[in-house]
Image: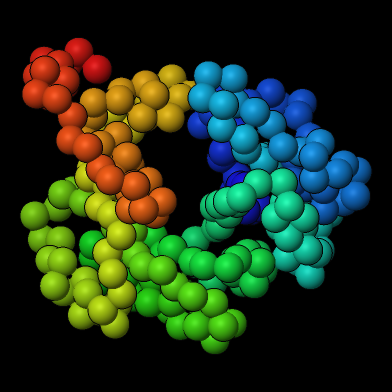
């Protein structure tokens, strides 16, 4: 569910039909939960986009957002809410609807300081924070070490580390998930490993021949 109501982008990244029903329509009671769930053609992923129309942003009432998120709980065993960054009202409503929370940050002091505030907020709401996901790892030589990250984040486990990867930008231009567009890229490997961590499945390394394909730029 694209819970980033102020600046949604899920429909753009996945090239979803622009005339589709959205989460905003559910909040405005113009559609049911079933009607706003779309199936991505090439992946089979079931997604709920939010509207990119600025005029619709003013329609929703913040107090309705949590109830809107909760309407999806009966439609799938697992529902992932991709919330907006920061500590805005829509973020608080997403946290209220969640059973567990994963905080995403980059390995630098500014990002991690904001991330820890998010952890504190979730704990105040009585929510379990499963851990932290580090994004754009390896972008700068001066980034914090894992030990420093754990120290700043009160020893919350690092669930995964998504590396800085040029294939992410390339996959967004293709409007496809990177694990589909470039399945042997470093970020795809990291996302697969993260999925295994979250689902309790064993992670299998790629065969050597596939690593060679990647090094040669052959996906």
Which residue is found at the position 44% from the left and 73% from the top?
129
Give left or right: position of 10 versus 173.
right
Which residue is found at the position 39% from the left and 60% from the top?
104
Tell which residue pokes out farthest to the bottom in this image: 124
Which residue is found at the position 38% from the left and 77% from the top?
116
Which residue is found at the position 21% from the left and 71% from the top?
149
Q: Position of residue 76 (x, y in %)?
A: 65, 46
With respect to residue 41, does 115 lie above or below? below
Q: Toward which corner of the image does residue 209 lie, by quadrant?
A: top left
Q: Position of residue 131 (x, y in %)?
A: 36, 68
53 or 117: nearer the viewer? 117
With respect to residue 198, does 32 lie above or below? above
Give left or right: position of 4 versus 60.
left
51 or 193: nearer the viewer? 193
Image quadrant holding the C terminus, namely top left
With respect to residue 149, does 28 lie above or below? above
Residue 212 visible in the shown view: yes
Q: Toward which corner of the image does residue 171 lie, by quadrant?
A: top left
Give left or right: position of 7 versus 27.
left
């Amino acid at each position: 569910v694209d819970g980033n109501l102020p600046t949604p982008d899920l429909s753009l990244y996945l090239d979803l039909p622009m005339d589709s029903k959205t989460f905003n329509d559910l909040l405005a009671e113009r559609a049911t939960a079933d009607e706003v769930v779309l199936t991505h053609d090439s992946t089979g992923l079931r997604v709920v986009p939010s509207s990119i129309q600025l005029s619709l942003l003013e329609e929703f009432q913040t107090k309705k957002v949590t109830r809107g998120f909760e309407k999806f709980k009966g439609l799938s065993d697992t529902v992932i809410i991709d919330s907006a960054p920061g500590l805005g009202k829509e973020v608080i409503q997403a946290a209220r609807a969640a059973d567990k929370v994963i905080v995403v940050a980059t390995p630098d002091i500014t990002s991690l300081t904001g991330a820890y505030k998010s952890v504190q907020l979730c704990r105040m709401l009585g929510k379990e924070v499963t851990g932290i996901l580090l994004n754009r790892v390896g972008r700068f030589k001066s980034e914090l070490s894992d030990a420093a990250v754990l120290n700043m984040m009160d020893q919350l486990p690092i669930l995964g580390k998504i590396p800085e990867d040029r294939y992410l930008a390339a996959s967004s231009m293709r409007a496809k998930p990177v694990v589909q567009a470039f399945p042997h890229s470093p970020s795809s490997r990291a996302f697969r490993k993260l999925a295994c961590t979250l689902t309790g499945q064993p992670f299998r390394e790629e065969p050597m021949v596939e690593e060679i394909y990647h090094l040669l730029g052959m996906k």
